[in-house]
Image: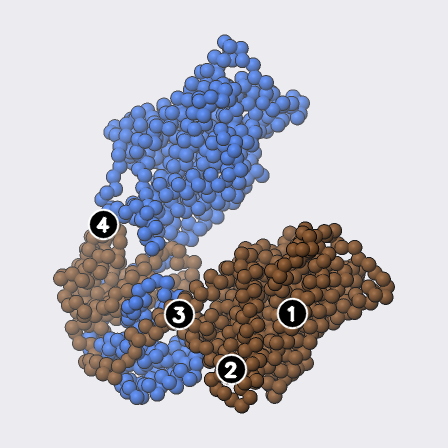
Chain colours: A blue, B brown
Amino acid sequence: MFSKLRRLLIGETLTTDQLSHEKFNVLWGLPILSSDAISSVAYAGEEILWVLIPVLGMMSYKYMFYAALCIVFLLFLLVFSYRQTIDNYPHGGGSYIVSKDNLGTIPSLTAAASLSIDYILTVAVSTSAGTAAITSAIPELLPYKVLITVLIIVLLSIGNLRGIKDSSRMFGVPTYLFILTVGIMIVTGILRYYFFGYRPSPIVPIEAKQTMGNITVLLFLRAFASGCTALTGVEAVSDGIPNFKAPAQKHAKIVLGLLAGTVLFIFGGLSYLSTLYHAAPDPNVTVLAQIGTQVFGSGFMFYALQFTTALILIMAANTAFADFPLLLSFIARDGYAPRQFSRRGKRLGFSNGIMLLCIASSLLAIIFSGSTHLLMPLYAVGVFISFTLSQSGMFTKWIKEKTPGWRHKAVINGMGALVTFCTVIVIGATKFLHGAWIVCILIPILVVIMLRIRRHYLRVAEQLKLTADLRPKEVIPNDDKQHVVILVDSLNKSFIKSLNYAKHLSSNIVAFHVATDSECAEKLQKKWEEYNVGIPLIVKHSPYRDVYEPLVKFIESEEHASKPGEIVTVVISQFVITKWWHNILHNQTSLFIKSMLYKRRNIVVVTVPYIIQE
Amino acid sequence: MFSKLRRLLIGETLTTDQLSHEKFNVLWGLPILSSDAISSVAYAGEEILWVLIPVLGMMSYKYMFYAALCIVFLLFLLVFSYRQTIDNYPHGGGSYIVSKDNLGTIPSLTAAASLSIDYILTVAVSTSAGTAAITSAIPELLPYKVLITVLIIVLLSIGNLRGIKDSSRMFGVPTYLFILTVGIMIVTGILRYYFFGYRPSPIVPIEAKQTMGNITVLLFLRAFASGCTALTGVEAVSDGIPNFKAPAQKHAKIVLGLLAGTVLFIFGGLSYLSTLYHAAPDPNVTVLAQIGTQVFGSGFMFYALQFTTALILIMAANTAFADFPLLLSFIARDGYAPRQFSRRGKRLGFSNGIMLLCIASSLLAIIFSGSTHLLMPLYAVGVFISFTLSQSGMFTKWIKEKTPGWRHKAVINGMGALVTFCTVIVIGATKFLHGAWIVCILIPILVVIMLRIRRHYLRVAEQLKLTADLRPKEVIPNDDKQHVVILVDSLNKSFIKSLNYAKHLSSNIVAFHVATDSECAEKLQKKWEEYNVGIPLIVKHSPYRDVYEPLVKFIESEEHASKPGEIVTVVISQFVITKWWHNILHNQTSLFIKSMLYKRRNIVVVTVPYIIQE
């Protein structure tokens, strides 16, 4: 019944060799791998304004522009250093792998932890931002904001459980549509302003809460930190190298370049527009939507803008659904995460990872009531920690290997590492109280957990390891010394079946009955003699109406012939019912006893099924 | 960990022989057995007014009084006929037992169903009424009405899981307190009216919605029907006979008489008072509280009244917690309800029944948002159906047995049956649309379910029954024809332990490995030869990464030597971990495979535990 439902939702099971990967060229590589990076522009500018407007009012736009510039500079630095990662990790260089190769366990786990947190946040943030785009177009939907967000997440999860290929070209289209519409907006926006003399009045009257003197460095840094979210998802390209057509690395680098160009254009353009059109952050209408309405009015183009924005943001979330389970499977394979995450599900996706992501991100969306702005402070920290780690990974690589031209390369990655590290500090410091602290606590905790998991697996392996001296026993399969205890509840066919089986095991069999109700016990004993079963029946009374204790006591007692350490076989007849709901009509004592007996080193449980037809 | 929590909540396990019953005399029997009946007076009057006031306004009180009279008459009729039940069922004559003895299966099941519904409603109604008493005293609590109700139910459940003796005297006190306070109120109320000339203005200005002409019979019947809730719980005495000191029956009868007297006094008195003080139903303030404020002002006595009312109502709910699980255990013993209900829990209470009652009544309270008035229409029907059944049961008994003086007795019970039956019709008809229909549908459904359950148990018993000709086989232990398949995941100590055990079973052993990942399989095969295990290893590739299917296919295939119908033993090594949370680190494949294998007639599963220390 459950399996039917599953099949309906996620489709028929697939065979392992159906696993394939469509490779793509620059034309499709760009939109598919960059949806995360490009889409983040949809909220980055707004985040800067959230910081500035309340303090500087109309003055904000100037400083916003400066912040944007710094971010763009950072972007290009990243591009250069990632080009080198691409060169050296043809099979994909996520920061987990890079730092594992060059920095060792703890750093790699730190990268793993921050990346994981980050993927979860990507989903939460992108879907809420997507919902925001929708609700800004259709305000009627505002009250259902959280619901919509969660719904999107669930749909994405189902889609990925079904196994949508993250490489399918279809996913490229929204990115291009977004770039197109935003491009048109930027151009028309500028034209309207300069040639048609459109002069916007601020949507909400804004006056500076403070005097000019107070534009402190700190404020600027906070603005910058908030804007850095625009850079999330840049590393996607270097992860995705294996998906490129040969020459993969060359294509990847081109894509990375184009990506940077696009982000520069859109992010720069939007920041400029919001300067011209005095967009001010508003919990109910996104800045993008505000600009949109002023540039396009509320006609078709406006809705097109909102729609494509929502779409690309959802695509961004979807990339996380493709990458997070993969990362988790790497970690699991290295033994730092539960093994289940390394196994492919019915439809070849890493189901467990997908479901974990679904639950975690939905929870976040619910807790933060689907507000992008509230989620932001948690977001960027993780990204930049992983940036820093992968960069310093590359740096140490050059220092160690000293391959030709290593100095120049080391400088680039060193720079990258340094700058991204500073950014981590800035973000962490400026946003600490707004939520960054959660991440700062979470990462070490996750690292410890991962180490513990690994330790557990090692111990288990240790205890299971075969030593050459340990040989299988030579047993003559006819020794009657084996102790068999057969549980009897009442004398019936099911019992006889078990008895017949037990007789194969040994001739040293005793039947054991736990009497929770003395009259039943007497009845059984009478029947036992009448029927003369031929094996001794031991009856123990259980004042606490508990079946397990007396059984174990009996087995361990002198009364029972087995010496300590000797294996005792307990035969249980399991009563099988064809209709699942009938199970509520039978108390599952035997199942319970079994689960308890398993815990005992020297008891082997034999289950003899007896099927009841309806 | 869970068990710790349980011990904390419900205490240590008790032995069966700790089961005892404190017997009580008239003095304590009265309050303990009558709390349900007496407490119901707290809302019965109000229910009548809910029907009349909207139509008749100030005229209502006259007709209320008539209605009350009829109800009191009905009460005495019941007393007389129940005296006879007491005479003939010294071990307690609930209507389930009476109708089982005299009317047969279907009627007894109908009684069982209606009683069960009734007990659940008693809890829901009494606790909501109790909450109402509290909230009328402390209006600040009104918004938390439902929460409080559910909380009370949960506390009662825990208390009963711990095993509060329903016979403990402590439970008698509230009843006496209630009788006392209400008595004082009635007396002072009348005095104030006649001697101190207190003249109340109606709390809410009421004018008749309709002209006098419309006081139809139907209206009156509806009022009467609503008032009948005052009679719920009368049968409690005849159920409780075994708890009386000898001469039990004599004592029971006296208590029954006193009970009737008390109800007459309180119910009559309150109806009269509401006439004097123009109490009018109000969803937020109970009629009792309205009268209370006018009689006592808002001083100590008022709060005492509200408090004792709440207390006795909670006691009433508690009696249901004592009786329902008991009834259920009778039904279960007769095979009409899941067996689990017939077994005593750790603390000797019938835990399952208690929990069922807790869940069901909480749900009701939540669905009807803790409103007594909304629950009422469902309530009385069940009570009177069971009255009718037990009465007609007694009636037929006389007709059949013709014991001395049977005519006179038959007349009494016949009357009882007839009148209660009419009441059922009246209640059912007048309240059908207000909710009675739910009960009318539910009862037959429950009856059918109970019959089905019984049928299932009979079938199972049938299939398990031993026939004299079926004798245990004569087997030479360890004949080598036995087929043993031992599952191997990887070659480790745990496997060797299972292998060693398997060798005891037979020398005809094959190891079976399902390859979900081909390189692992090759590794295993290499290791297998190196180590030369000495038994054949069969490897099957599972493209769908499913382990169960290939195994079964193999066993059924020609390849495997077993002939159809022959029993095959599958040996599985179960990996046991000491820390429960470590289980999330190991996918429970073996558990899953087992649960599937159990479903197959000819496969016996042998589980060899291997404990991993931490």
Q: In this rendering, do the residues under marks 2 and 1 share a single chain?
A: yes
Q: Give the label, 4 or 3, closer to the camera.
A: 3
Q: For residue A473, which quarter of the picture?
A: bottom left
Cα separation between marks 4 and 2: 58 Å
The answer to which image quadrant residue B305 occupies is bottom right
Q: Quadrant of the C terminus of chain B?
A: bottom left
Read off the chain for label 4: B
- The answer, for residue B451, to whether it is visible in the render is yes
Give the label on residue B17, or none.
2
Q: CA distance from mark 4 to mark 3?
A: 47 Å
Which residue bears the numbered disc 4? B543
Q: Which residue is mark 1?
A: B70
| Amino acid type at mark 4 | Pro
- Residue carrying label 3: B451
Residue toward you, A435 or A289: A289
Q: Nearer the viewer, mark 4 or mark 2?
A: 2
Measuring from the top left, give residue A171's x and y in whole percent.
34, 32
Tell me the amino acid under the disc marked 3. Answer: Leu
Residue drawn at 42 percent across, 61 percent down: B580
| Residue A396 visible within the image | no
Query: Are discs 4 and 3 both within one chain?
Result: yes
Of the image marks 2 and 1, the number of the one nearer the N terminus = 2
How far apart marks 1 and 4 lie (CA) works out to 78 Å
Mark 4 or mark 3, earlier in chain: 3
Q: Mark 4 or mark 1, which is nearer the start of the sequence?
A: 1
A433 over B202 or under it: above or below? above
Q: Which residue occupies 82% across, 59% down?
A: B199
Query: Is A133 located above or below residue A151 in the figure?
Result: above
Residue B297: which quarter of the image?
Answer: bottom right
Q: Earlier in the sequence, mark 4 or mark 2?
A: 2
